[in-house]
Image: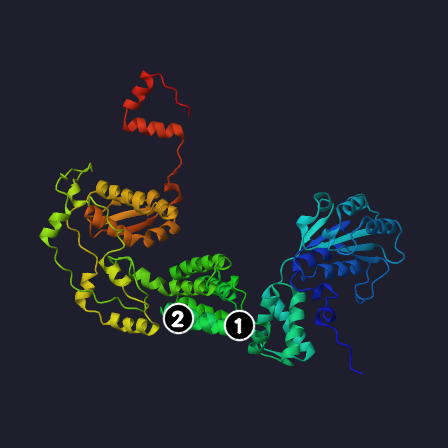
Amino acid sequence: MAEHFIVSARKYRPDSWETVVGQKHITTTLQSAIANEQIAQAYLFTGPRGVGKTTCARIFAKAVNGSLGEHLDDLQFNVFELDAASNNSVDDIRSIVDSVRIPPQTGKYKVYIIDEVHMLSAAAFNAFLKTLEEPPAHAIFILATTEKHKIIPTILSRCQIFDFNRIKIKDIADHLAHIATQEGVTAEAEALHVIATKADGAMRDALSIFDQVVAFCGRNLTYSAVIQNLNVLDYDYYFRLTDLILAEDVAGCLVLFDEVLNKGFDGHHFITGLGGHFRNLLVSKDAQTIPLMELSESVAEKYKTQAANSDLRLLIQGLQMINECDTQFRASKHQRLLVELTLMKLASILYNREGEKKKFSLKPFRGAARPVLPARPQPIASTQATAQPATAPPATLPIEGASITTSSIPKTPVAPPTLGKRNIILQSQESVSIKGVMARRQQQQQQTAEEQQEIAVEKPTREYTTAELQMAWQSFADQKMSHNMQAQSAFKVAEVELILSNTLRVALPSVTQEMYFNEHRNQLAEYFRTQFDIRGIDYKIEIMRPDEIKSTYQTAKQRFDNLVQENPALETLRKTFNLQIDF
């Protein structure tokens, strides 16, 4: 008759301090307490599921009575266990209180292990308080729970609290390798690492998954078989996708995502995995943060190689886009389109950065070449004459150090600056196919020098002053950024100063606000050109030190004092009419 099968979680349950995995800080403390005879009356073991709380409680119960060499299944009569999940009434606690009075028949201590103690009712907790506070010298209570916050403070104050950590992936994988050797199972290191990752820090879950994949794969655990059985997305997909993003291959990203969906994976699972992949790439950029990756050595080397070829800003902006997609996924009615749009944005980050100084703001994908633009037609004098109001006399705007006449500012409503001739041409392109995108990319590489000169940054037509540029800057923030509070705040708090004839120093409080500025940089240039005839401005971006950032909050008195400084007649008016201002 075949031997009865015992699951690995029971068969390989630790029976000594040395076999406990990943909780060295707790086992060492408990061993020292026993050795020094400094045993408390009550302990609270708290932590996630499957990390060894009850196991350590049983080992401790045997150790205090000097019977640690025996198997844990042979519990002494002076060790009692109570499952509070199913025995949470006052009567159950009273039975413990009554038995506490009886000294142990063998050994020195009677140990009471109450598992899932947070499930006790409020009345049961109250009935337990007095006994827990003043138990007999021979009684020790060990309370185990996964939800410490549900235990009343009066119980917590009477216990020594030990917090169990999630077991590290490497420790779980090493323990699984040991068990596989004991069971005669051949397992690839990558396969065991996948099991350890899937267990999420719980050794019991890892052993259950190990039994499952052994039943599926037999005595040979391979990486491909394990990810197939556990429905885990292969690392290779994310490495391939990142290569496509770095190559700015929009078509390849969409095709790969379709392949993932056809294999039965959920779009949300895919995008969260991509976020973890980008996070690992970011961590791999610095030798100090590499230990934060809990990966096998072979996979970690792949991350180091790809991280070396990845741009830091691409990873940071990519993580922000992926996080936005993750938060919007559940509420989206077209979830596949949401993920595809995120992939398109990721594949366009590098192109957008290269095109920051272009005169137009609407840009195609990196894979698509810009359409060949026709020569600009010369304006007709008669048309311009009819377009100008005949009765609008030129007036001078009050700008310190310079004069700009209102004749250069349109009197009639104008279209948004982003809808220029180039954008109209781009908007007229209808549903470009993927093949067309690739063909235009080849056309872009053959662009003529004349076209490159046409889209280059314009040269200044005159000398500008700091006051003139500051006024134009504030006008842009007030009029064009009113619909976007974050972007408007970035422009409002910026300090701008003309340091060269055409170079504007822009000091911003943070990198996030620098990103908002770069996002609207082309729109700012278009606004400067159309509204103030300011062209060819270059920007030197600086991030302020914390001590340089000025507070934007002012009290009512400070605001009034500022107004008085600008117009002293306000204070005269207040005194004349004996006005009292409530600050």
Residue found 72% across the figure and 66% down from its top: 14
SS for callout 1: loop
The residue that mark 1 highlights is: 264
Residue 413, how many percent across, how many down?
24, 46
The residue that mark 2 highlights is: 244
How busy is the neighbourhood of tag 2: few (under 14 within 10 Å), some, or many (20 plus)?
Answer: some
- Does 88 appear above or below 19? above
Residue 252, how many percent across, how many down?
39, 72
From this viewpoint, which residue is outermost toward the front?
386
Image quadrant holding the N terminus, namely bottom right
Residue found 69% across the figure and 61% down from its top: 52
Confirm whether residue 332 shows in the render: yes
Question: Looking at the image, is mark 1 or mark 2 earlier in the sequence?
Answer: 2
Q: How is the image coloured?
A: rainbow
Q: CA distance from mark 1 to mark 2?
A: 22 Å
Confirm whether residue 178 shows in the render: no
